[in-house]
Amino acid sequence: MEFLHDCAEEGKHGRILITGTNGSGKTTLLMRVKERFGDQAYLFSNHTNLFFENSIGKEYSTGQRLRANVEEVLERMKDPSVRLFLFDEWNANLDEENQKEISSHIDRLAGEGLVLEVRNKEV
């Protein structure tokens, strides 16, 4: 946690990837990071229906919903206190094309802040 805190405080950006098998504690780790950083972190969970303002009332597939949420966060990057973006198995249930597209959106986000992502598999 101290490493992430130092990186966020120093304004570092990029992507940090943690992989592991089911049940190894990846999601628990992200929850602890979110708990520690509070409003300084956005959590994109694949296990909940996270919807932002521009998504309300629209029917989206998993990939479309995630892409819309990432795009909206990119538009709202005016708050410098948010420097940490947490992605929980964002590539689960996505086809290869959507994985590549969303990964490029996450790359853009990583240019603005620090992305911590957990996955079962590589993209």
Image: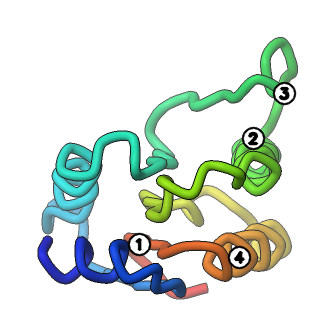
Vertical position of residue 57 compared to residue 25: above or below: above
Nearest to N terminus: mark 3 or mark 1: 3
Which numbered mark, 2 or 3, is in the foreground of this view? 3
Q: Alpha-carbon distance for marks 4 and 1? A: 13 Å
Q: Which residue is mark 3?
A: 54
Dot 4 or dot 3: first in sequence order is 3
Which of the 4 image quadrants contains residue 88?
A: bottom left
Q: Nearer the viewer, mark 4 or mark 3?
A: 3
- Expressed as whole percent of the image width and height from the top left, the position of residue 90 reads 55, 60
Q: Which residue is mark 4?
A: 103
Report the Cα–Cα distance between label 1 and label 2.
Answer: 19 Å
Relative image position of residue 117 (x, y in whole percent):
43, 71
What amino acid type should be assigned to the residue bearing mark 1?
Leu
Between discs 2 and 4, the one toward the N terminus: 2
Q: Are marks 3 and 1 in contact (CB under 8 Å)?
A: no
Q: Quadrant of the N terminus?
A: bottom left
Badge 2 local density, few (<14 within 10 Å), some, or many (20+)? Answer: some
Is label 1 in a helix, a strand or a loop? Answer: strand
The residue at the far top in this view is 57
Question: From the image, which quarter does the C terminus lie in?
Answer: bottom right
Q: Mark 2 and mark 3: span between their CA atoms?
A: 10 Å
Q: Nearer the viewer, mark 4 or mark 1?
A: 1
Give the percent coordinates (x, y) of residue 101. 83, 72
| Residue that badge 1 annotates | 116
Q: Which label belongs to residue 65?
A: 2
Q: Residue at x 23, y 57 (%)?
A: 33
Q: Residue at x 48, y 54 (%)?
A: 81
